[in-house]
Image: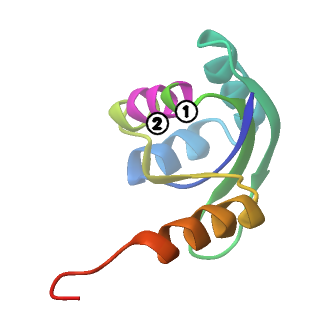
Amino acid sequence: MATFYALGKYTAQGYQGFCKDPKSDRAQAARTAAEAVGAKLVSYTGLRGAYDFFVIFEGTFEQGAGIKMATEASGTLCNITICEAININDVAANAAKIAAAYKGPGQ
């Protein structure tokens, strides 16, 4: 399984939910969403700043995209960005192979 990092924000509707239930366990909600598609929640952290939460999960991109789609469709979350952990050296090795063979337009 790949490791993914997701950042997101609560909407006004999401904040209204917190006002109704300030003890809402969002880590458990994230775990439930992940498990529903066979992914694994590693951690959930609330944030102060440009984003409201940070999630680490293991699974596939399709699982993460499904979680994003369903949770944003609920109206309580928005602007979820999913990033995948990579090995930058593997990326650089592929880039070096391409750079040796690739010719841009007009070259």
- Please give the range of residues in magenta: 63-70
For the residues labelled 1 and 2, say whether their Cβ atoms are less than 8 Å apart.
yes
**Residue at position x 65%, y 35% in the image:** 21
Q: Locate residue 104 relative to residue 90 in the image: left or right.
A: left
Q: Which mark is residue 68?
A: 2
Q: Which is nearer the eye, 67 or 105?
A: 105
In the picture as drawn, the residue positioned furthest to the bottom comes out as 107
Q: Which mark is residue 22?
A: none
Q: Which callout, 1 or 2, points to the residue nearer the camera? A: 1
**Residue at position x 76%, y 37% in the image:** 23
Q: Which is nearer the eye, 28 or 3?
A: 3
Q: Which is nearer the eye, 45 or 67?
A: 67
Q: Which is nearer the eye, 25 or 79?
A: 79
Label 1: state its secondary structure: helix
Image height check: is 77 above or below 2? below
Residue type at the position of mark 1? Gly
**Does the magenta-highlighted stretch encompass residue 39?**
no
Image height check: is 75 above or below 8? above
Task: Characterize the magenta stretch by its predominant secondary structure.
Answer: helix
Instruction: Locate the C terminus and report the quarter of the image it occupies.
Output: bottom left
The picture places residue 7, in percent across and down from the top left corner, at: 60, 56
Residue annotated with mark 1: 64
Residue 24 appears in the rendering: no
Label 2: state its secondary structure: helix
